[in-house]
């Protein structure tokens, strides 16, 4: 018989968090991340109600502690919550960018359509991540399967070309970043300039001036200008007059040259790209449609409705719908990353009438061009007057 009378037994203390990561609980993760247990649980389950920064912090804490979700607990919780949550939902991400004027509209449409197909949706800003690696880890944590890039600015810089896009199904809505050959939803620059020109002809205008600002996509610039040149060459019998100017910046960057051209050429209608040129013309003192009519090559339906401008509707509401449909199909068939032969969906233009381009020409207003009192470009209170801008000079 063994006796241990008067003997102290020293027990070795084990660090279970180093030697047995399975003993780390969600409470430890919550404490390390500095959030409540409920927030940690919601973050680990990818709930969109938790801020992206908080989800990233919780994910980092879980990774550092080696926390692994208890599969049996998840199943039990799933049974209690119902069949819908028995397995983790797939997630689609809309990658936002600065300057997206219609972000809220696109986000709402994208989310609603995706949720009808059973997806969770996250709004993502790549610029918010400290590194590409952190973004990839967070995307895996969120169980993101598909990404929609609605504008070129969604990709903050060339360093993101090194991002592991092969993990995701990706659709973009622009032709920039040709290295990222994802399926694309886009406008046809040629279709839109043709519709603007044809509508001008149908409204009775025969003397057209085109003001085209250079875009980030050279191919689109070439399409717009090529369409004008081709039509002028192929239809000489229509007695149409067409001249154009290509701007590297805005009208306000070269006001004297543009005003001199308009005074000399005296177009009946100006067809402009992008729509912002309309406001720049007003700022220079032009009266539309008294001096000349104005047609925008492409803008949103709301823009036309608010400002009374005539032009081609960009149909931006189509993009989120097409993006969700394409991503859903790609996820089902396993199309991921950069593709050898990506598909293209071309959104056709739709014409919007506006007061800036009336169908009936007022001869008493135009005569041989601008009226005599309008040739001093503008009202006395206009920016052009204060800048000493006078087309007669």
Image (tube, rainbow, N blue to C red):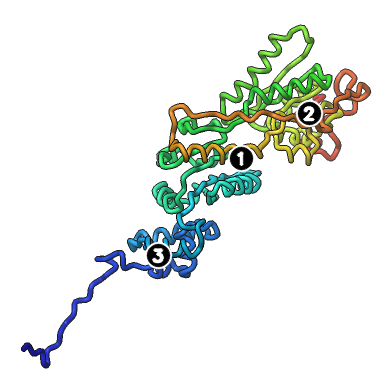
Q: Closer to the camera, 330 or 161?
A: 330
Q: How many angstroms separate mark 3 from mark 1 (CA)?
A: 37 Å
**326 w.r.t. 259: above or below:** below
Residue beneath disc 1: 321
Judging from the image, what secondary structure is the residue with disc 1 in? helix
Give the residue at the far right of this rendering. Answer: 364
Judging from the image, what secondary structure is the residue with disc 2 in? strand
Residue beneath disc 3: 73
Residue beneath disc 2: 294
Q: How many angstroms separate mark 2 from mark 1 (CA)?
A: 31 Å
Q: Is residue 159 left or right of residue 352?
A: left
Give the residue displayed 46% in from the left and 53% down from the top. 142
Residue 298 at what x, y percent from top left? Answer: 69, 31
Give the residue displayed 47% in from the left and 31% down from the top. 181
User: Crowdedness of circle 3 by 10 Å Cα count: few (<14), some, many (20+)?
Assistant: few
Decide: marks 3, 2 in contact (CB < 8 A)? no
């Amino acid at each position: 018989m063994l006796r241990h009378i008067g003997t102290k037994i020293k027990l070795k203390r084990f660090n279970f968090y180093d030697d047995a990561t399975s003993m780390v609980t969600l409470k430890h993760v919550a404490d390390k991340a500095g959030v409540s247990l409920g927030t940690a649980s919601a973050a680990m389950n990818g709930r969109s109600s938790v801020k992206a920064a908080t989800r990233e912090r919780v994910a980092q804490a879980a990774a550092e502690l080696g926390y692994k979700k208890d599969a049996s607990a998840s199943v039990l919780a799933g049974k209690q919550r119902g069949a819908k949550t028995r397995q983790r939902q797939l997630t689609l991400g809309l990658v936002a960018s600065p300057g997206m004027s219609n972000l809220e509209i696109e986000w709402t449409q994208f989310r609603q359509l995706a949720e009808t197909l059973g997806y969770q949706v996250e709004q993502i800003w790549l610029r918010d991540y400290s590194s590409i690696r952190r973004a990839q880890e967070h995307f895996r944590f969120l169980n993101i399967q598909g990404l929609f890039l609605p504008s070129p600015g969604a990709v903050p810089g060339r360093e993101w070309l090194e991002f592991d896009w092969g993990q995701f199904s990706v659709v973009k809505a622009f032709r920039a970043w040709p290295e990222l050959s994802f399926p694309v939803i886009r406008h046809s620059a040629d279709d839109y300039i043709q519709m603007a020109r044809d509508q001008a002809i149908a409204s009775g205008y025969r003397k057209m001036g085109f003001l085209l600002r250079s875009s980030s996509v050279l191919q689109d610039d070439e399409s717009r200008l090529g369409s004008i040149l081709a039509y002028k060459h192929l239809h000489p019998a229509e007695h149409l007059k067409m001249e154009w100017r290509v701007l590297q910046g805005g009208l306000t960057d070269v006001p004297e040259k543009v005003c001199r051209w308009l005074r000399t050429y005296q177009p009946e209608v100006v067809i402009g790209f992008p729509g912002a040129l309309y406001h720049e013309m007003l700022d220079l003192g032009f009266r539309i449609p008294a001096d000349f009519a104005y047609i925008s090559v492409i803008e949103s339906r709301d823009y036309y409705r608010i400002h009374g401008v005539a032009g081609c509707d960009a149909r931006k509401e189509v993009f989120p719908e097409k993006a969700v449909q394409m991503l859903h199909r790609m996820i089902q068939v396993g199309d991921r990353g950069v593709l050898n032969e990506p598909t293209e969906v071309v959104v056709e233009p739709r014409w919007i009438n506006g007061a800036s381009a009336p169908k009936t020409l007022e001869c008493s207003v135009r005569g041989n061009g601008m009226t005599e009192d309008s040739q001093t470009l503008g009202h006395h209170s206009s920016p052009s007057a204060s800048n000493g801008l006078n087309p007669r000079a």
